Image: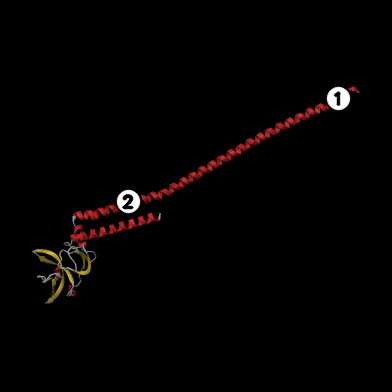
Amino acid sequence: MNMKKAIKITVSVLAWIVLILALLVTILVFTADSNNGVSNLLGYMPLTVESDSMSPTFSSGDLIIDCEIDDVYKLQKDDVITFWTIIDGNKVKNTHRIIGVNSRNGSVSFVTKGDKNDVKDSIEVYPSDIIGKWTGVKIGGFGSVMSFLRTKTGFFVCIIIPIALFFLFELYKFIVTIVEIKRPAAVQLDEEEIKKKAIEEYLAQQKEKSDSESKDSAADTETSDSKNEDSEAEATTTDSGNNQPENNDNKGE
């Protein structure tokens, strides 16, 4: 019984974990769609690394976590930032390390370079281009998973199906609970019926026993009365026999 209970608890915990993860991924996917492909959850942004330019710090397919920047002027050399830039005529996200800070007439810009690259980036980064600062957290290979989850197939397989299974599992638990609640009542009702029948049978037996004893007592009474009548009859006959000779003697005299 304890083993079954432990298994139920384990399955329930795993189901809730799957649901929570599915909901988190759903939020991330939707926020990314509404924010130029950048997910944002309470100021933290999970990003997929798309090149090896920062290797060995992190590599293509890794997932890194950036945070929002309140004051770009606090950024300094060796910080790793994610920013918008132009590569081959396309606006893309890039994550590189700051190797220089330029301040001109109260404005600031940053010179960046990938750890694996031999040369610095050709375009300076301005505050309006910055997406966030790397927190130092990375999950190897999970960025590819996030990219897959953003597709329709990935979202259906990894989000919709687990959520549907979770609700089916909870529905099953609800039905089982209802059945278990009703079962003790039925068992108790059966026990009451058994007790009632047992009492009725006992009373019937007692009544039969009482009736039988009454009949036996009546029969004994009738037998006793018959015996008494026979005794009286015999006594009367004896008395009559004794009186007869006396009468004869009197006549002789």
Residue at x 26% of width, y 59% of height: 21
User: Residue lying farthest right?
Assistant: 253
Q: What is the distance, in whole Å, between disc 2 and disc 1 at their CAs?
A: 115 Å
Residue at x 56% of width, y 41% of height: 203
* 192 relative position to 220: left or right: left
* 249 relative position to 192: left or right: right
Which residue is the site of mark 2?
171
Vertical order, 70 against 177 (above or below): below
Which residue is the site of mark 1?
247
* 224 relative position to 100: left or right: right
Q: Inspect the image, locate mark 2, and give the three-letter code of the amino acid beneath it.
A: Leu
Residue at x 13% of width, y 64% of height: 92
Percent x, y for residue 219? 65, 34
Mark 2, secondary structure of its residue: helix
- Mark 2: few/some/many CA within 10 Å (<14, 14-19, 20+): few
Q: Based on the displayed image, in which of its 4 quarters is residue 18 positioned?
A: bottom left
Q: Earlier in the sequence, mark 2 or mark 1?
A: 2
Q: Quadrant of the N terminus?
A: bottom left
Percent x, y for residue 111? 13, 73
Q: Inspect the image, locate mark 1, and give the three-letter code of the amino acid beneath it.
A: Asn
Mark 1, secondary structure of its residue: helix
Percent x, y for residue 104? 11, 76
